[in-house]
Amino acid sequence: MTGALRIAGNAGGLFHLRDGAVIAIDSPGSPGAETLLVGSGRIGAQDWAAALADSVAAGSLQAALAARGLLRPVEARALALALVQDGAFAVAAGEVEEHDVVDDLGDVPLLPVAGGVEVGLLLSETARRLDAVASLAVPVEPYRDRVVPGREVAGPAAERREVVLHATGRRTVRDIAFAVGRSLYPVTVEISRMLGGGVLEIASPVASFSFSHGGLAALRSRAELADAGRPG
């Protein structure tokens, strides 16, 4: 088919298909091209905006980035494939509530994969990634678990130091991926390993929510609310 498969859930996503192959995936759980390029500091915000403007006339963001010397064609193709693979992982790692198919693709994806990705290959790669995370000593849930620095001193790698910097107890793994400008899957794996090594710890509910929501009755346990409603 040519169209789009829309997945509702947490985080959900939109699969763009052309002739039965997946050419792009948009998911709020997975950082997009702008986050990976601009958020990581690889491309400046002004250069990105200029390339977007150029892409209207060029008919392709990839061509506009290449014309400005910001991203070589081989790098753009690799990025487009990485976005599809990470988007599929982001959808599968969350909760799927329902789906529907639409015939119209709607907006053209910024960086589609030329020729698309065969569905069977994408499924097997997504399953491999899910299994890889589940096999780690401390697997982490990207949309639920929040982390804080642990007792062990973080290693010298700059990527680890950046993750620790954003591990405030308020951010989920998904939030940290967006903050550091990296794809969800590698950040999920890295944080899981850091949890296993004591560099990070799962934040307690108090640390995660009390900063802004601690006084809300909706966040109190049902048992606590029931006790409060009983006569003394």
Image (tube, rainbow, N blue to C red):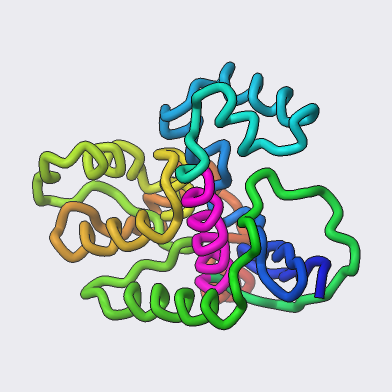
Whether residue 232 is visible to the viewer of this picture, yes or no, is: no
Q: Hey, which quadrant is residue 34 in on the image?
A: top right
Magenta stretch, main secondary structure, is helix
- Residue depicted at x 47% and y 51%: 78
Where residue 74 sits in the image (x, y, percent)?
47, 45
Magenta span includes 161: no
Image: 187 above or below 136: above
Q: Give the answer, above or below, for where 61 lies relative to 213.
A: above
Q: Nearer the viewer, residue 99 or 229?
A: 99
Q: Residue at x 47, y 63 (%)?
A: 144
In which quadrant will I find the N terminus? bottom right
Q: Is residue 218 left or right of residue 140?
A: right
Task: Give the answer, above or below, for where 227 lies relative to 109.
Answer: below
**Region rendered in magenta:** 76-93
Side of 150 where 190 appears, left or right: right
Residue occupying image coordinates x 34% and y 73% = 133
- Residue extending farthest to the right is 103
Name the image quarter holding residue 47: top right
Residue located at (79% from left, 27% from top): 57
In percent of width and height, residue 69 lies at 50, 24
Q: Is residue 121 visible?
A: yes
Residue 162 is left or right of residue 29, and the answer is left
Q: Quadrant of the C terminus?
A: bottom right
- Residue 42 position, x and y percent, is 42, 29
Q: What count of labels does the image hold?
A: 0
